Image (tube, grey):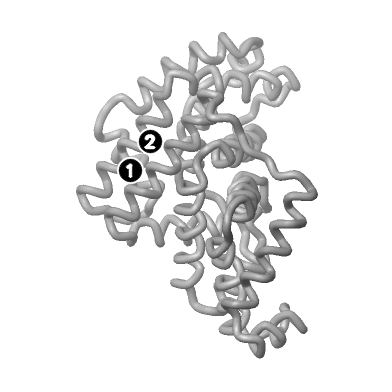
Amino acid sequence: MNMKKTKNIAALALALAVLSPVAMWPCEARAQSKSAEQIAVSVRLVLREQYGTPEQIDAVVHRLYGATLSPQKAEVARRTFLTLAFHKAFPMYLGKLLEPIYRAGVTSTAQIKPLVQDGVEHTFGKGFTRISAEQQEVLLRHVLDMFRALEPSECKRMFLGQVSTTEFDALERRFAAELPLEKFKALNEVYVAAMEAELNGYPDARSVSTEQAKLADEALNRAADKRIPREVFDRVVADVPNASPTDACSFMTSFSESMLDLDEPYRSWLLTQFVGNMGAPGPK
């Protein structure tokens, strides 16, 4: 499963908040903004101007989901965006992200946009490694539920990494907009927890050693053997690209879900690997 394509709506929301002040500053002003502290001061002012009214926040929510959310979901989405964009550490985070970009002489919005988006996504990826295994499980279940809701051919393309980040973002936004309220709330709570953990610098990020990854993979293979019928396993593994979409999607979702059957520490090791890849850059 190519998790390097897996992004999240909260990263998109924060990227919007980042790119708004970037777009507002003339190129000359960017070139003169030499320190992270100077940039942070400007960010605070621009964020208040751009997202200071309910109408402005509603416009962000609509841009993110491309659908009319229920009043309860819209309130959750507004609260998530406000918590992230107005976190006390966010302006300095943005200042540190933009400072080396500006110092390198990159000042056009078109050049800065992909760098900022990758930076925000990478930050979420690091934050996901700081949250609890229970919260990481929410992310895994969300991704697998979304893949199962797709047509088998689309699901197979997702797992094989044949879908661009732009396509994936659009699919996730549509799927999230249709989630039951409680799942929508749980997902947003995890996004907030991850970004706050990274901005605050605690809890400590968890990592997985080469030896731990090897042991976890062996445990996952044993668990998958119990979930996946042998005939399906043999058909797919023999030729994944040419396997039927139904077999491929069933195999790959069941294989990934097998990590939830594991005891500790294998379960936590695999979940940490999974969420860490959620912030890895992928093709646009």
Residue 21 location, x and y as percent?
Answer: 49, 25
Residue at disc 2, secondary structure:
helix
To which quarter of the image does residue 248 belong? bottom right
Q: Is residue 68 above or below residue 46?
A: below
To which quarter of the image does residue 3 belong? bottom right
Q: In the image, 265: left or right of 106? A: left
Q: Is residue 141 above or below residue 35?
A: below
The amino acid type found where label 1 is placed reads Ala
Residue 225 location, x and y as percent?
Answer: 64, 77
The amino acid type found where label 2 is placed reads Phe
The residue pinned by badge 2 equals 81
- Name the foreground residue: 197 vs 60: 197
The residue pinned by badge 1 equals 77
Point out the residue furthest to the bottom here. 231
Q: Is residue 222 above or below residue 197?
A: below
Other residues around mark 2 within 10 Å, as few (<14) / some (14–19) / many (≥20): many
Across the whole image, how many numbered discs are drawn on residues? 2
Contact between labelled residues 2 and 1, with CB atoms less than 8 Å apart: yes
Residue at disc 1, secondary structure:
helix
